[in-house]
Amino acid sequence: MAVHAASGTARPRRARSARAFATDRQVLDGAFAVILESGWSGLSVLACAKRVGLSSKAVNDRHASVSHLGVAVWQDSAGPALREALVSVMEVMLPGDGSAVDVAAGTRAFTSLARPGDSLIVAGELLAAAVFDEVVREAIAADLQSWLGGWCLPEGKVTAARAAQGVYTLVAAMGLLFAFRRPGAAKVNLALQVGYLADALAHPAKPSRLPALEAAHMRLDPPGPVTDEHDALLAAMVLEVAAHGYAGATLVRIMAATNSTEGLLYSRYDSKIELFVAATKWRTEFGFMANLNWFRAVSEKVGPGLADAVVWREYLRPEHVLGRGLAIEQVRTGWREPLLQEVNDAAEAELAKTMQKANPALSRSVVLANLHWDISLGYGAELVPSFFPDAWKLPFDVVAVPMLTGPAAGDLVLGYLAE
């Protein structure tokens, strides 16, 4: 702070002008609009400035980087909107006074995330961005832990079992937000699924020791020996996106990792997105069967409830961070890349057929609602560990067992249990 030479008194800081505050607002509104329309990967200082007719310097003077600009948008609008939605879900589904859950209110709370407005859409973009951006991740994690710690962190009066219920509910909520762009998502009625979750939360199982079985296939090792140059390219693309995100992935690093030439790469693919689409197909075919076979094997040993709890642990455990990153980028990139979205949609359509076959007595609308719920849980389980890294240690059998052995069991038979 400047000091007057003669008196030694501090020189008053000049008050910012109304125009400066107006420019602050323009910058935030511009960044918000760019994220909403073009996603996180579309945000840049130049894109923000052009959106609202400012100079790049006006943006740079206020925010040190795109990451800090994203944090500012989070703090200004996206974060408060998500806080209101998530806290509403928690207050309804996990009332502290032991009262019964109002299923209609719970359905409305979850649906607000499943059919989000603009601020929640931007919040979802920032949640995905946080997986690869440390600055954004630290800001969001601090907020989420502050807002939801009383439900999701096992400390003080919150037992590990109660925290498992909280994280399970949070996974569903955040997953529904991430899944809202799925075909038909806006028409799904979640009342049945919310009712089943409410019943499972009201009748928790006693925590038990889960089998020490790691789902090694969730690591991003190649699905078998890499026998030719093409498979090596696909495997390298998978790892590159998992580590850096799609926008940060470079073909130069992929060629270096595989000792490939531009000639080999471009003889097969015209662009990075075409290579990513092919890698996604390659990995999805392996991943689906690996998940199916692994779950069946665990179910035969301990039953579907405990097996599902093991799946939760494996989704969330730190060793599988690359697999989660890949899954998030496959979904997020597909939002704006039709070629990739076709792959995602086709995989989910096959899963819907499998679930319908496994549940022939159920209506198609119920099967599709169950599918949307299950996919949302998967998305949420891929997002939440970035903000609650120790969640994998929680006893998720307190919810998984009643979900798959209680009143819901007849309607929520998982598709991958079908032969």
Image (cartoon, helix red, strand yellow):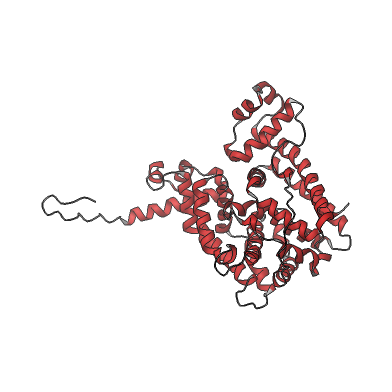
Q: Position of residue 59 (x, y in %)?
A: 41, 45
Q: Position of residue 413 (x, y in %)?
A: 82, 60
Q: Position of residue 356 (x, y in %)?
A: 85, 56
Residue 113 vertical position relative to residue 328 in the rendered view, above or below: below
Q: Position of residue 60 (x, y in %)?
A: 40, 43
Q: Residue at x 68, y 69 (%)?
A: 107
Q: Residue at x 75, y 42 (%)?
A: 284
Foreground of the two, 302 or 228: 302
Foreground of the two, 414 or 41: 414
- Disc tally is 0
Q: Residue at x 69, y 23 (%)?
A: 264
The answer to whether residue 181 of the structure is visible from this angle is no
Q: Quadrant of residue 160?
A: bottom right
Foreground of the two, 56 or 243: 243
Q: Quadrant of residue 234?
A: top right
Residue 28 vertical position relative to residue 326 in the rendered view, above or below: below
The answer to whether residue 329 of the structure is visible from this angle is yes
Q: Residue at x 38, y 55 (%)?
A: 22
